[in-house]
């Protein structure tokens, strides 16, 4: 799916093309070489300089936060004729009033309008900083290197937005962990963490690919590409000398773009580790809640067994026909162990009540239930026929 956004951009920009990434033929050497033999709009008959940088961008559409990941192909041809072709891995929209994210489906009819709005907003955000780079030189390689460096820096800055989202989810997880099971559901937080992990993982994949390919510099300048590889990794066995500022006039910009991508990859890996740690913490909290619920159930079962077992034991020991009805003092005194057992069960329920905001409800409920049971036994004993 391809769309061209008409945006208010400097004269250096001819078009911004937003394209869903096709995993089947994603940026092969043949496709990249063929693209370099066309102009910035894809028309044959001219050559272009190409760079590919990772895309991580946080932007808003109608006040709703969106996240986009993928790759941006910078195409420069002619005199300051530039196009950005965005290969999207996905756009995620943050749901209103919740922390969860939902990936927009470009093929779904119900989400077509949202997809168009989000892709258009992304195109505008990408096109805004497009100007000729550096000293106003008309060298296409220089312009491509400068734009690639700016885009890589923007993507690296967007990693801070991912970190802020993770902080918010971490705080929400901490808050839900202190609430009761009913009012502290972690389903939305866990779902958001999973989506954030997917976003960071996909962005890291694009970043690693861009660094491995040297931003695809080898398509138009293989010698500069190999020289910069030696600069990054002197252990490479080759006869090529490491790149310097004298290798190419724009080598400093290209090196800065690569290093921005390397730093972006480190930050994304850090966020992925932190997200998985939060998921493990959420699982631990869930297990702890289940253990607490089981403990509360066991306590309730013990109190209920005392409340029902002691009266049954006393009646079995004395015999109901000898103890009932409770119309004489000796029979009433013999009934005291039943009352004592219920009082003991009430005290046990109070001491073993769970901690937290529902402790008072637990104590009052247990005391009321055992008091009602005692009252029922007393009334039944008094009204029992002679």
Image (cartoon, grey):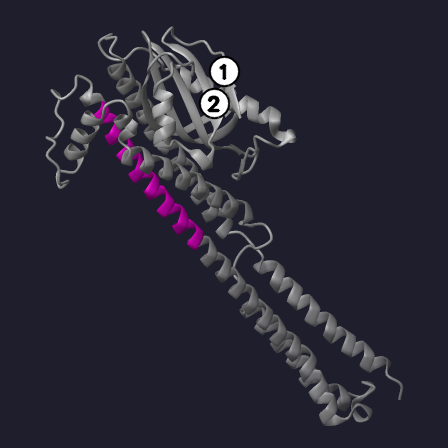
Q: Which residues are magenta?
A: 254-280
Q: Is residue 329 above or below residue 279?
A: below
Q: Residues within 10 Å of mark 2 (few under 14, many from 20)?
A: many
- Of the two numbered discs 1 and 2 on the same chain, state the one appearing first in sequence: 1
* Disc 1 from disc 2: Cα separation: 8 Å
The label shown at residue 36 is: none
Q: Is residue 136 left or right of residue 298?
A: left
Local packing at callout 1 (Cα closer than 10 Å; few below 14, some 14-19, many 20+) is some
Q: Are marks 1 and 2 in contact (CB under 8 Å)?
A: yes
Q: Residue furthest front?
A: 45
- Residue located farthest toward the right when viewing the structure as drawn: 385
Q: Is residue 216 left or right of residue 290?
A: left
The residue depicted at 34 percent of the width and 28 percent of the height is 53
Front residue (pair 170, 325): 170
At horizontal 42% and vertical 33% (from top left) the residue drawn is 26
At mark 1, the secondary structure is loop
Expressed as whole percent of the image width and height from the top left, the position of residue 383 reads: 86, 80
For image coordinates 83% across by 81% down, the residue present is 382
Viewer-side residue, 160 vs 229: 229
The answer to whether residue 78 of the structure is visible from this angle is: yes
In the rendered image, which quarter is residue 255 located in? top left
Residue 363, placed above or below residue 153: below
Instruction: Check disc 2 and report the residue beneath it.
Output: 18
User: Residue 64 location in percent, x, y?
Assistant: 53, 27
In the rendered image, residue 185, in percent from the top left (x then y), is placed at 56, 50
- Hey, which quadrant is residue 336 in on the image? bottom right
Element type at mark 2:
strand
- Residue identifier under label 1: 5
What secondary structure is the stretch in magenta mostly built from? helix
Identify the image quadrant of residue 201.
top left
Judge from the rendering whether residue 123 lies leftward or rightward of residue 263; answer left or right: right
């Amino acid at each position: 799916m391809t769309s061209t956004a008409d945006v208010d951009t400097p004269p250096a920009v001819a078009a911004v093309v937003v394209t869903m990434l096709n995993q089947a033929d994603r940026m092969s050497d043949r496709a990249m070489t063929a693209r370099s033999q066309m102009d910035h709009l894809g028309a044959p008959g001219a050559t272009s300089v190409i760079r590919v940088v990772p895309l991580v961008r946080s932007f808003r559409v109608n006040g709703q936060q969106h996240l986009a990941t993928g790759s941006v192909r910078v195409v420069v041809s002619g005199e300051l004729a530039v196009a950005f072709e965005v290969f999207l891995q996905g756009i995620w929209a943050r749901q209103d009033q919740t922390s969860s994210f939902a990936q927009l489906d470009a093929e779904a009819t119900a989400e077509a309008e949202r997809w168009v709005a989000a892709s258009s907003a992304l195109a505008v955000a990408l096109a805004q900083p497009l100007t000729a780079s550096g000293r106003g030189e008309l060298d296409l390689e220089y312009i491509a290197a400068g734009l690639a460096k700016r885009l890589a820096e923007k993507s690296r800055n967007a990693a801070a937005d991912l970190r802020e989202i993770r902080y918010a989810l971490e705080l929400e997880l901490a808050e839900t962990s202190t609430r009761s099971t009913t009012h502290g559901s972690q389903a939305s937080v866990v779902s958001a963490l999973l989506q954030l992990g997917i976003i960071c993982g996909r962005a890291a994949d694009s970043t690693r690919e861009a660094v491995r390919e040297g931003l695809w510099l080898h398509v138009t300048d293989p010698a500069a590409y190999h020289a910069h590889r030696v600069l990054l990794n002197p252990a490479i066995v080759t006869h090529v000398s490491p790149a310097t500022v004298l290798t190419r006039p724009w080598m400093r910009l290209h090196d800065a773009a690569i290093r921005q991508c390397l730093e972006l990859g480190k930050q994304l890996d850090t966020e992925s580790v932190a997200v998985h740690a939060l998921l493990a913490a959420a699982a631990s909290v869930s297990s702890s809640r289940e253990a607490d619920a089981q403990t509360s159930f066991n306590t309730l079962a013990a109190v209920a067994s005392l409340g029902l077992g002691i009266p049954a034991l006393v009646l079995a020991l004395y015999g109901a026909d000898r103890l009932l009805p409770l119309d004489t003092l000796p029979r009433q005194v013999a009934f005291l162990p039943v009352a004592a057992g219920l009082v003991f069960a009430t005290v046990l329920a109070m001491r073993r009540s769970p901690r937290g905001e529902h402790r008072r409800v637990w104590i009052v409920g247990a005391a009321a239930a055992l008091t009602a049971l005692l009252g029922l036994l007393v009334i039944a004993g008094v009204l029992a026929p002679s």
